[in-house]
Image (tube, helix red, strand yellow):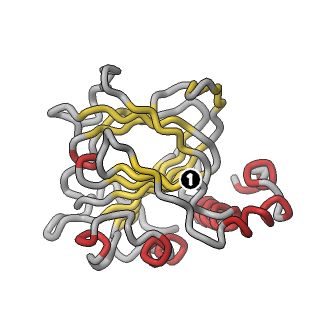
Amino acid sequence: MSNNIDWEDLFGSDDDSDKEVEEREHAKPIITFEAIPGLKLIKQALSHQEQMSLTHALIDRNFFTGNANQAMLFGELPDFIKWVEPWISDNYPDLFGQDIMHRQPLFDQAILNMYKKGQGITSHVDLLRFEDGILIISLMSSCVMTMRPARKDATSYHAENTDDSEKHDILLCPGDVLALSQEARYDWEHGIPSRLVDEIEGRSIERGTRISVTLRKLKHGEQEMPSAATSER
């Protein structure tokens, strides 16, 4: 699969990233949302090189071969993901509350998803077997994630939430990092509508293939989900 990917088309050339590296000498600002406490967004948080390295690592380890579009990792995370924890602590110590930031480890579960052009995910709240504090890293293509007040059965993926009365659209671009805690984690659903083009802020954004890396922590005493778990390959 990696041989069919034009990395320069996706990420630009190394020369294109020179200015970006200079701009990233300081951490990017954390964007908050008044209507959704605990929802925080860092635009272009990952550098050109960090995006390429992480995407290469996922593809080179054959997580997305054949018809596979999802993989799960549990326990001590591999080095190509593990670096995210100290990176957050060093650059964004206020991304989560201190109770979350001080736990060890910060994350012990990763879900890796590949979305082909036009694909999405049903609006949902992450399973309650996971603790507060969820991190989403967006790679390769932009998309719009929609937040809605949670329904009683929001942890189920069987029914889509189509209530747009209080929805909030969040544009996720390659390299963006989204954090969910507190109300954003428990009281709001997040989902990605299935469509080829997103309309937001007067812009039309065509989707391509997108990869997301979601990091979470299992609650103490919870068991791994062997039916869905995929070891590093």
Q: Position of residue 232 (x, y in %)?
A: 48, 68
Dot 1 alpha-carbon crowd within 10 angstroms: few under 14, some 14 to 19, many 20 or more: some
Taking the image as shown, residue 42 lies to the left or right of residue 4, namely left
Q: Position of residue 30 (x, y in %)?
A: 47, 57
- Residue 204 or 65: which is nearer the viewer? 204
Quadrant of res 163 = top left
Residue at image location 45% in from the left, 71% down from the top: 88
Q: Position of residue 46 (x, y in %)?
A: 60, 62
Would you place residue 74 above or below residue 188 in this image?
below
Taking the image as shown, residue 95 lies to the left or right of residue 129, namely right
Judged from the image, the secondary structure of the residue bearing numbered disc 1 is loop
Would you place residue 203 above or below residue 226 in this image?
above
Taking the image as shown, residue 159 lies to the left or right of residue 202, namely left
Residue at image location 29% in from the left, 79% down from the top: 104
Identify the amino acid type marked 1: Lys
Taking the image as shown, residue 158 lies to the left or right of residue 93, namely left
Residue at image location 39% in from the left, 32% down from the top: 168
- Residue 65 or 189: which is nearer the viewer? 189
Mark 1, residue position = 43
Residue at image location 46% in from the left, 28% down from the top: 193
Q: Position of residue 199 (x, y in %)?
A: 57, 24
- Residue 87 or 19: which is nearer the viewer? 19
